[in-house]
Image (spheres, grey):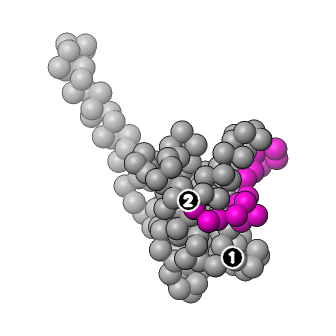
Amino acid sequence: LAEVEIEEGLAADRYGAITFGTLNNPYKFTEEMIALWARVMKEVPDSRFLVVRPEASSSGFCKNFADEFARHGVSADRLVLFDNRQEEKSHLGYYNDIDISLDTFPLTGGTTTCEAIWMGVPVITLVGERDKLLAWRHGLREVMRQSPLCDEERFVDDFQSMLDQVADLHGLR
């Protein structure tokens, strides 16, 4: 993962409200999931929801997304949809504008979940104390760095071992 800087403070301090968000692919968005996201937003007054996807340049996508939230009592002025292809910057930088990433279901994030954690953004659905958010913002990258996911030597060794087993199994040596 790229060494994109984690900005000082929280998005909530910069925007005056908690910002939920996702960089997940919209094919994972369901009516039930948006209903739950809207419920979370209604529980957090003035919160915003940021979607960073190339599809945000489509007026149809934006209208359908806003209409679905409106069905559940969340107005379009609380939604921020941004086409990440409009600027020449790493998409990881957009996580600096999200306080809490809300995961998709039933298809969950994989890469986006790892990227959010790398950028210090918890992937949860409950709002905790802002002190905890700040600690997570600046502590999750090291947790991830120490995890097996970022242990390159172990990955290479395990991958090589698997290739050796396949070669032996199929007589490819």
Q: Which residue is mark 1?
A: 46
Q: Residue at x 82, y 44 (%)?
A: 86
Q: Earlier in the sequence, mark 1 or mark 2?
A: 1
The answer to whether residue 17 is seen in the rendering is yes
* Magenta extent: 72-91
Distance between the Cα atoms at labels 1 and 2?
22 Å
Q: x, y (%) of residue 141? A: 53, 65
Task: Based on the picture, tell me whether residue 77 belongs to the magenta stretch.
Answer: yes
Q: x, y (%) of residue 138? A: 58, 74
Secondary element at image label 1: loop
Q: x, y (%) of residue 84? A: 74, 46
Q: Which residue is mark 2?
A: 116
**Does 101 sit above or below residue 133?**
above
Q: In this orientation, which residue lies closer to the viewer: 139 or 170?
A: 139
Residue 20 is tagged as none
**Does 127 sit above or below residue 165?**
below
